[in-house]
Image (spheres, rainbow, N blue to C red):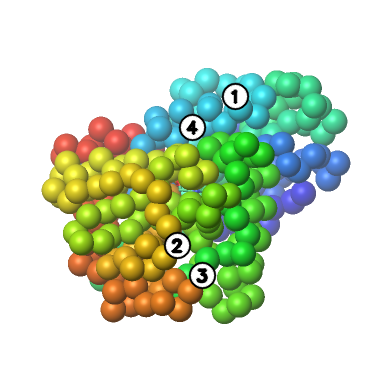
Amino acid sequence: MQMSAAFHGAKFCWMDGSVIETEKALVTAMNEMYLGIFEGIKAYVAENSLREGILNIFRWESHIERLWHSAAVCGITIPCTREQLLEATRETIKANGFTTDVYIQPRLWPEAGTGHLVGKGIHILVPVWTFETILGKGNPRFSEKTRTMVSSWRRISSDAMPAQAKCWANYANSALGAREAARLGYDAALFLDSRGFVSEGTNACVMSIRDGKLITPPVTASILESITRSSILKIVPEDLGIPVEVRDISRVELYASDEAFFCGTGWEITPITSIDDIPIGDEHPGPLTQRIAEYYGQIVTGNVEKRRNWLTPA
Ligand code: PMP
């Protein structure tokens, strides 16, 4: 499989121990495609005067903890230390000369023909590429409509697939939901779990705001243990004084949200403007969503002193 040299500006990546040109990061087409794991991490340019110009990785340790957990669940032995992976990430950013916000996606997979042999022949790749944050002040993308539909596909159940791990195979579920939404003219899909309660979006968790309280489904609703979700569950009550509740949400209750949004490393905070064509609020980002997004944007750029321990210099 060959990645394009124009892979979001990622001329170089780190593979199996050294920085190489991305177009030379090749694996055989005979590789089993379903056994790999990965992580999705972002690094943001620091805005505060102390660290101007430096990229900070948001919640590196939590992401790495989850990567090691995904590996354990999927029988993968990670062929490097956590420190080596951080160094590999830093080297890759440096080699590419990135000075803007970047997305880091460590990927691990067993060599062709060894997939059934636990812990054998594991490849590791660290691609890094650029992205545009939607959290920036006044970014029009934040106010774009996200017309969401409840997918006819249920979220994979954790008794059939490791829903709490970032295993590539899980993402066929997300892709089916996203494709269905696109085919029917929606912007995003939302999954119910096997019990019929709200689970999550495609690669994002879901938050509802009702009567001034933020409500989100529990881990037992087959969600990925999202790091953005856990950050929000911490900062919203502690720093913004907004009460939170973690509990099952029914589809109809979600329709009655005053505000709702998706959250995730990639999605950051994306307001949901309607679900199944039922408007959420006035179909514009609501005041609490805006407040949370603004504050989250301040944290990731290093402007919130008490949350700087979530940032690791890249
Ligand atoms: N659910 C799934 C299935 C995901 O892939 C992601 C993105 N990692 C999320 C939720 C959000 O998780 P996080 O906040 O850790 O990015």
**Mark 2 close to ligand 1, CB under 8 Å:** no
Establish if 71 lies above or below 201. Answer: above
The residues tagged by marks 3 and 2 sit, at their Cα atoms, a distance apart of 11 Å
| Disc number for residue 218 | none
Establish if 258 lies above or below 299. Answer: below
Which residue is the site of mark 2?
251
Which residue is depicted at the point 40% across and 32% down? 62
Tell us which disc is closer to us: 3 or 1.
Answer: 3
Earlier in the chain: of badge 3 and badge 2, it is 3
Give, as a three-letter code, the residue at label 3: Met
Which residue is depicted at the point 66% across and 39% down? 160
Which residue is the site of mark 3?
149
Crowd around label 4: few <14 · some 14–19 · many ≥20 (10 Å): many
Give, as a three-letter code, the residue at label 2: Arg
Image x and y of residue 65, in percent: 46, 28
- Asked if residue 19 can be seen in this view, the reply is no
Crowd around label 1: few <14 · some 14–19 · many ≥20 (10 Å): some
**Mark 4 close to ligand 1, CB under 8 Å:** yes
Which residue is depicted at the point 57% across and 79% down? 185
Earlier in the chain: of badge 1 and badge 2, it is 1
Viewer-proximal residue among 147 and 113:
147
Q: Are marks 4 and 2 in contact (CB under 8 Å)?
A: no
